[in-house]
Image: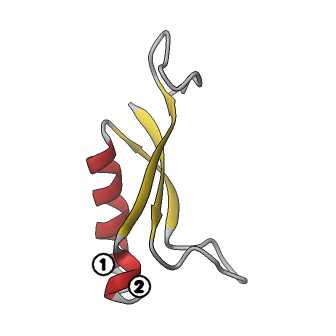
Amino acid sequence: MKLWLVTLQGMTLSINSAPHGMAYVLANDPKEAADKLINYVKSKDLGFRHERELKSVELIAEDVLYPDCRMKLFT
């Protein structure tokens, strides 16, 4: 399992709550991580279509003995 920071094109700022366009996601690969967040915002009908487009997926940590990203994830 790996921890990813997924960022969409919009909905990344919020005054009263957590932004819906950025999230830490547990997934095995970057496509799965992106799909989880995009499917969530679509199911809740959050934001506009162009705001739901993927901007980036960054590997934060992984659950292996010697992680390539240099940060270990404990699950």
Image position, residue 16 (x, y; %): 71, 83
Residue that mark 1 sits on? 42
Image position, residue 7 (x, y; %): 48, 62
Image position, residue 46 (x, y; %): 41, 85
Judge whether 70 appears above or below 11 on screen.
Answer: above
Amino acid residing under circle 2: Leu
Q: Residue furthest right?
A: 15
Instruction: Find residue 42 and report its image quarter.
Output: bottom left
> Helix, strand or loop at disc 2?
loop
Q: Residue furthest bottom?
A: 48
Could you say which is closer to the camera, residue 25 or residue 53? 53
At 35% from the left and 84% from the top, the residue drawn is 50
Judge whether 12 appears above or below 25 on screen.
Answer: below
Instruction: Find residue 8 and report its image quarter.
Output: bottom left
Judge whether 33 appears above or below 68 on screen.
Answer: below
Residue that mark 2 sits on? 46
